[in-house]
Amino acid sequence: MEKKLIKIHRVTKVVKGGRIFSYTATSIVGNRKKNIGLGRGKSREVLESIKKSYLKAKKNILKLNFSKNIIPYFLFAKHCATKVFLYPANDIIGLIASKYVKQVLNIIGVFSVFSKIHGSTNAINVVICTIKALSLIKK
């Protein structure tokens, strides 16, 4: 399994005695054979939150249905204020996508897609939306 860290976010809680910092890590896990898992972990230390996110991603693995390493037709998904459009492309074109969409598609094993994002470009929402769009593929 291949692991990729999407984002680490520092959260601050203000209390009477000062500030308390905690960290949220978001990661994806895949094997380049159409399996992907998304996980989020929270902890007061960075390394613990990363480990938790990897463990949760391994538990939430989703099997996607498509035959080759290309998407067969146009896909669209929406999550919160994020809309992701995925268009099939030739092998010559390759991946034309944002940073987070590229990470998801690389970990699945898809290497020829043109994508567009409308609305919010929040990293976590874009990843969730891309996985939703890919899960809509029917055999």
Image (tube, helix red, strand yellow):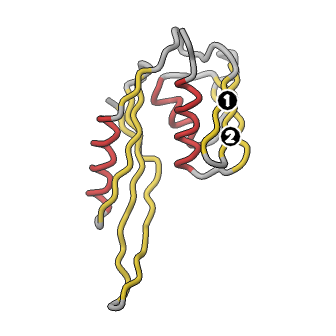
Count the marks: how many? 2
Q: Is residue 102 above or below residue 134?
A: below
Residue that appears at 48% across and 22% down: 109
Of the two numbered discs 2 and 1 on the same chain, state the one appearing first in sequence.
1
Quarter holding residue 32: top left
Left or right: where does residue 58 sit relative to residue 73?
Answer: left
What residue occupies the far bottom of the structure in this picture?
Answer: 17
Left or right: where does residue 128 sit relative to residue 84?
Answer: left
Quarter holding residue 73: top right
Residue that appears at 66% across and 24% down: 75
Instruction: List the residue tagged with mark 1.
Output: 76
Residue type, mark 1 in image = Phe
Instruction: List the residue tagged with mark 2.
Output: 83
Task: Provide residue 78's location: percent of width, then percent of height.
Answer: 64, 38
Quarter of the figure with the C terminus: top right
Q: Is residue 62 above or below residue 79?
A: above
Task: Provide residue 115's location: percent of width, then percent of height.
Answer: 69, 32
